[in-house]
Each structure stands twice: as structure tokens, then as C-alpha cells.
Image: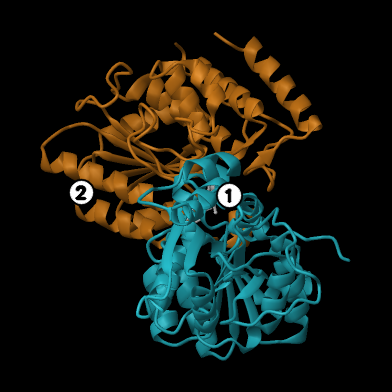
């Protein structure tokens, strides 16, 4: 088994490979190339790796134009800068104009740690979901990210992918497969269903163990494809367990909780609740502190589940 | 205190803070030390006991990641206790990586998303103009930061509104995050560009406190237009082994780096007033 790789290394190595295979691919950066390590890609591709400088809004417009000219742009910056900072350009020049552009937002939510409030995006998923026709994904590990990147040439329209650059644990076997619009059942269970993405899966797996001690057998779903969302899987587990709890490193407004609630609400077949960031801005700190502060912990998940199960 | 000595102390205090934290934005903090020394040591009307004094001059660090140098300056001026500097970037700190007006005494604007501080400074200057106040507004913008289109909107606005109460410093340290600015993004001449927009434009050695002092005097005496002072600076200035290196933007100090820092700190202590 290959040792787990940082997701930024997966981006570097996979895009390197894809650049060699497909002459239409162009990478765009906004002075954070060294942060995602695309600066290490072979110099023979340098004419298709454009470091725009610190100009996220212009970069999105340029990406749209590159796609009009027939190329396939992959755009990267930190999550708040590709979303909040350049939103109207993403919305109109890419979304509304129906351009095929892959946008990578790194270190969303608390993962930005020491860069603090200005760099902490609890809204990127909400913003990207609100664009008609968009695809919105959050990566759980290196295996998934490589798999998705290798499929991505066929993606149509705007695709937003959120990753944590460093330190993601391996979750999947090397031969795992992933399909846009399909959730992955990590653990089956019949008493409750916990749905999460990205760094929250680690907390959910912890919560699962703690719930066992309370006699609760919880299912876990990795809903990495937040949009489109896997409605049939949601229905199946809503009916089977009657209780759906979501967990996200994002504002409860507009993210995973919203997506799940929107999908299930007409059917009223389960209780739905979620943990996530509530009415807060970001701040500096290390992940354990930030998880505590924003209640993004296994304990918070357990408490939430028990609040519906302990009657 | 002599401005050179104040600069020496700001550099020393900033390095001690970063060394204690073991990582941080070293390069861009070092390149603005002399400017902070002249602003806070001589020109700016500020009251450390009353940080939001309506009579104060305003300062916006638009390149908000250089917070450490500003925190050192504010602590030395007495805005808060020096012991607080040891909490830089800690969990629940009041001294985050990027400047935050709501949690740090003496910070006039929250910054960190590059380009935005420039517009906010222009807004403060316009607000003071409307209220017929004569406080001055100073803003430091990075040379890489000037990639952001928003900066050019701010410039246009400042000139149109004849904001002579605004002085813009460009920390032209020639480097941005990924490397040298002229390799990455921008090869144009700042002086010509700002002249074309209608600024009063000066270019000086950004590590010469006397040159900075007289440039500010000239800015204050300029009427009918904003001034830009282009600071020719060195990213990482003051730590010879780190100066001008493309990797000095944000450093995690190795054992070797720590030895270099210790030597520099020792030398700066000897140079103390
Ligand atoms: C909008 C935005 N995009 C990207 C960043 C990440 N970033 C922080 S500092 C920096 C480089 C800044 O270069 P410069 O303005 O020259 O600053 P200095 O050299 O003085 O450190 C970048 C890209 C940011 N803070 N804000
Ligand atoms: Mg610079």
C-alpha cells in the first residue's frame, strides 16, 4: 500500500500527469503556487501553468476566457479567495456563461488555522452551491482526490472542490471508486445516520465508537458530493434510521446540513439536525482549539444524537 | 528616542516574537520596520492610553500579514503590555497573524485579504475630509498586493476626491509569496503608474529613517492630491542570511535558522539605545 500523501502533493503529481496527457489543460494560480506545490511541476509545462499574481477576480475571468478559447482551466487559491473574493466573476463569467472550469479551494473552514479570520471560509460551499449547474465536492482523502482529478476532464460546467492541503488521514482502500452524485457508506447502522465530509469524518468515526457504548448503532455516510447530492441514499437511510445528523466544517447556512435538509424536507421521513458553525467568523488557532470553539467535535456529535435517542 | 534606535528595537522585538512562536511572516515584517519607526516614533498623533482617540492619525496595514512588526511597535509605544507578544498566533490570542481592529488595541482596520485595506484607508481619509478634520491617514501596501485590481479602484477614488490627507506607502521589497514580483506578475514601474493616476509620487530608500521622515513632511505639505511614497526595501531586512530570499515570506525556523536569529538578536541588543 502506498503511504498516504498530502492532498496538495496529490494535486501536484496528478496534474503533472494530466498535463502530459492532455494539451488543453491549463493551471492557474494566484501567488499561492508554493502553498499547493504546483511550483514543483516540471518546467516543460510552464507555458500551461500561469501564476497570475494576487488577482483572484481577474484569474476567474481569465479562466472563463481560456475555456472559451477551447482550453480546460484548473484554478487554485485558498478557499475564501476563490469563493468570497471572486464571487461575481465565478458566478457570471464561469457559472452563468456555462464555462467548464475546475476550481480548487484549499484549506476551507478551520483548516486554515494560523491564517485566521480573513482566510477562514465557512461560506465557500454555500456560495458555490448557489450557482445554478455547479458541482460541489469536498475531498476526504488522497485516494478520493486522485480518483476525482482523473475523472475531472469530463466534468461539465463549474466544479468546486474543497481540500485540506496537508495532514488528511487515509480513509479508503486504494481500489475504492467514487462517483459524482453518489455518497459512500462508510459504516452501516440502523439507529441513526451521521453524514459528513472532509475533516469531520474523523470526528464522526470517533463519535461512532462512543455511540456504540451507548448501545447506538449509527451509520456513517461520506457525502463528498454535496451537489449533486445522493437523494436515493438519503431516502434509504432516512427511512431505515429515522434520524439524520450532519457534521460540517462550514456554516450551517448553505452547506451540507442545508443540502441534506433541502433534499429530504418534502418527505418528512426523518428528524434532521446538524452540527456546524453558527453565526460566527473565523479566528487563528490550531485545529483542536478551533474544533472545540466551533463545536466540531465527536462529543458534539454524540450529544446531538443522544438528544434524540435518550427519551 | 532616535528613530534609528526605535527601528532597532522594533526589529529586535519582532524577531524575538517570531522566534518564540517558531514560525511566521518574517520577510514582510522586516521590510516595514523603519517606516513604522518614523510613523510611530515621530509623525503620527496617537495616544496609547486612548487608542481610539478621535484626534489620532490613522494607520492601516493593508498587507495585514506583517502584523508582528506592528504589534512590536504598538507594544513598545505602550498600547499593550510587551508580555502579550508571546501570545502571537496562539489559540484565543489578541494578536493574530493578520491585523484585527476588534481584538487588538491600536489597530485601526482589519486586514489580511490583500487589497482591501487600501480601499478602507481611502474611505477613512474621505470620511475625515467630509467631517473637516485634519487627522492624517497612512497605509502600507505590499508590492505584490498591488496585483489586486481593487488597489487601482482605490487609487482612482483617492485622486478624484483630492485626498491629500492620505499617504500611501508601497513596501517595494520586490518579492511576493511565490517569488520575485517581476518574474510572477508585474514588471511595470510603480512611479510612472502612480504618476499617471495623479498621485504626488516619491521614491526613497525604505530603510533610511531620515529619507522616510522628509518624505512624510513633503506628503503633509502636498495639497490637492494624495501622496505615494515608494519604499525601496529588502524583504527580510536586518537578517543578512535571510534577506532577499524567495522563501522568507513565511518561515518555519530550522535549528540553523534559530542560530542565525539568535546571532541577529544579540547584535540588535548591542545596538539598543
Ligand atoms: C486576497 C488575498 N490573496 C492571497 C493572499 C495570500 N497572501 C498573503 S501574503 C501574500 C503575498 C504578498 O506579497 P506582498 O504584498 O509583496 O507582501 P510582502 O512582500 O510585503 O510580504 C499572499 C499571496 C491574501 N492574503 N489575500
Ligand atoms: Mg513584497
As displayed, is residue B7 above or below residue A41?
above
Determine contact: label 1, label 2, CB under 8 Å.
no
Q: Residue at x 47, y 80 (%)?
A: A134
Whole-angstrom CA distance, mark 1 to mark 2, is 56 Å
Residue A240 position in % (x across, y down): 54, 75
Numbered circle sitting on residue B162: 2
User: Residue drawn 68% across and 71% down?
Assistant: A145
Quadrant in the picture for residue B266: top right
Rendered shade, chain B: orange
* Residue A263, position as x, y percentages in the image: 42, 78
B84 is higher (above) or lower (below) than A40: above
Task: Answer few, some or many: residues within 10 Å of disc 2's Cα (few below 14, many 20 plus, some between 14 and 19).
Answer: some
In the image: residue B238, left or right of residue A157? right
Residue A77 higher or lower than B89, as above or below: below
Residue A35 in percent (x, y) is at 65, 56
Q: Residue at x 62, y 89 (%)?
A: A154
Where residue B214 sits, quadrant-wise, is top left
Per the image, the residue denoted by label 1 is: A298
For mark 1, give the secondary structure: helix
Horizontally, is A55 left or right of A182 in the view? left
The chain letter under disc 1 is: A
Q: Which element type, helix, strand or loop, lies under badge 2?
A: loop
Q: Which chain is cyan?
A: A
Amino acid at each position: 500500500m502506498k503511504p498516504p500523501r498530502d492532498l496538495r502533493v496529490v494535486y501536484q503529481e496528478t496534474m503533472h500527469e494530466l498535463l502530459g496527457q492532455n494539451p488543453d489543460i491549463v493551471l492557474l494560480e494566484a501567488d499561492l503556487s508554493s502553498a499547493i506545490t504546483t511550483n514543483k511541476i516540471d518546467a516543460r509545462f510552464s507555458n500551461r501553468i500561469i501564476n497570475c499574481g494576487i488577482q483572484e477576480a481577474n484569474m476567474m475571468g481569465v479562466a472563463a476566457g481560456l475555456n472559451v478559447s477551447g482550453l480546460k482551466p484548473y484554478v487554485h487559491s485558498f478557499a475564501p479567495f476563490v469563493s468570497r473574493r471572486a464571487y461575481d466573476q465565478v458566478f457570471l463569467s464561469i457559472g452563468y456563461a456555462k464555462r467548464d472550469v475546475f476550481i480548487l479551494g484549499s484549506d476551507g473552514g478551520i483548516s486554515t488555522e494560523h491564517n485566521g479570520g480573513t482566510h477562514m471560509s465557512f461560506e465557500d460551499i454555500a456560495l458555490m452551491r448557489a450557482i445554478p449547474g455547479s458541482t460541489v465536492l469536498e475531498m476526504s482523502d488522497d485516494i478520493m482526490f486522485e480518483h476525482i482529478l482523473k475523472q475531472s476532464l469530463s466534468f461539465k460546467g463549474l466544479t468546486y472542490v474543497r481540500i485540506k492541503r496537508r495532514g488528511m488521514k487515509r480513509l479508503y482502500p486504494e481500489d475504492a471508486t467514487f462517483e459524482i452524485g453518489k455518497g459512500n457508506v462508510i459504516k452501516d447502522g440502523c439507529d441513526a445516520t451521521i453524514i459528513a465530509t472532509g475533516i469531520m469524518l474523523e470526528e464522526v468515526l470517533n463519535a461512532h465508537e462512543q455511540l456504540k457504548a451507548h448501545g447506538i448503532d449509527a451509520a456513517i455516510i461520506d457525502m463528498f458530493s454535496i451537489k449533486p447530492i445522493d437523494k436515493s441514499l438519503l431516502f434509504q437511510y432516512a427511512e431505515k434510521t429515522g434520524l439524520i445528523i450532519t457534521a460540517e466544517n462550514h456554516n450551517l447556512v448553505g452547506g451540507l446540513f442545508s443540502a441534506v435538509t433541502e433534499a429530504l424536507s418534502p418527505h418528512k421521513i426523518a428528524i434532521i439536525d446538524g452540527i456546524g458553525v453558527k453565526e460566527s467568523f473565523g479566528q487563528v488557532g490550531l485545529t483542536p482549539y478551533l474544533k472545540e470553539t466551533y463545536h466540531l467535535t465527536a462529543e458534539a456529535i454524540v450529544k446531538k444524537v443522544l438528544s434524540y435517542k435518550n427519551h | 528616542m532616535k528613530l534609528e534606535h526605535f527601528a532597532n528595537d522594533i526589529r529586535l522585538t519582532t524577531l524575538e516574537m517570531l522566534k518564540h512562536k517558531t514560525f511566521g511572516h518574517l520577510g514582510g515584517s522586516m521590510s516595514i520596520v523603519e517606516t513604522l519607526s518614523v510613523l510611530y516614533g515621530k509623525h503620527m498623533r496617537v495616544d496609547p492610553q486612548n487608542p481610539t482617540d478621535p484626534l489620532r492619525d490613522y494607520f492601516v496595514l493593508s498587507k495585514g500579514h506583517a502584523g508582528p512588526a506592528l504589534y512590536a511597535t504598538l507594544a513598545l509605544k505602550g498600547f499593550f503590555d510587551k508580555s502579550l507578544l508571546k501570545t502571537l498566533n496562539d489559540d484565543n490570542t489578541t494578536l493574530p497573524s493578520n491585523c484585527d481592529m476588534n481584538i487588538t488595541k491600536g489597530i485601526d482596520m482589519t486586514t489580511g485579504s490583500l487589497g482591501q485595506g487600501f480601499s478602507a484607508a481611502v474611505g477613512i481619509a474621505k470620511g475625515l475630509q467630509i467631517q473637516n478634520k485634519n487627522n492624517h491617514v497612512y497605509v502600507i501596501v505590499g508590492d505584490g498586493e498591488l496585483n489586486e485590481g481593487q488597489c487601482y479602484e482605490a487609487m482612482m477614488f483617492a485622486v478624484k476626491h483630492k485626498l491629500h490627507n492620505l499617504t500611501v506607502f508601497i513596501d517595494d521589497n520586490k518579492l511576493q509569496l511565490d517569488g520575485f514580483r517581476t518574474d510572477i506578475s508585474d514588471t511595470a514601474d510603480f512611479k510612472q503608474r502612480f504618476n499617471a493616476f495623479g498621485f504626488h509620487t516619491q521614491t526613497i530608500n525604505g530603510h533610511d529613517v531620515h529619507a522616510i521622515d522628509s518624505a512624510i513632511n513633503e506628503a503633509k505639505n502636498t495639497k490637492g492630491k494624495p501622496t505615494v511614497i515608494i519604499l525601496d526595501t529588502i524583504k527580510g531586512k536586518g537578517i543578512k542570511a535571510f534577506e532577499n530570499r524567495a522563501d522568507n515570506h513565511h518561515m518555519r525556523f530550522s535549528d540553523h535558522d534559530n542560530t542565525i536569529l539568535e546571532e541577529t538578536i544579540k547584535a540588535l541588543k548591542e545596538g539598543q539605545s
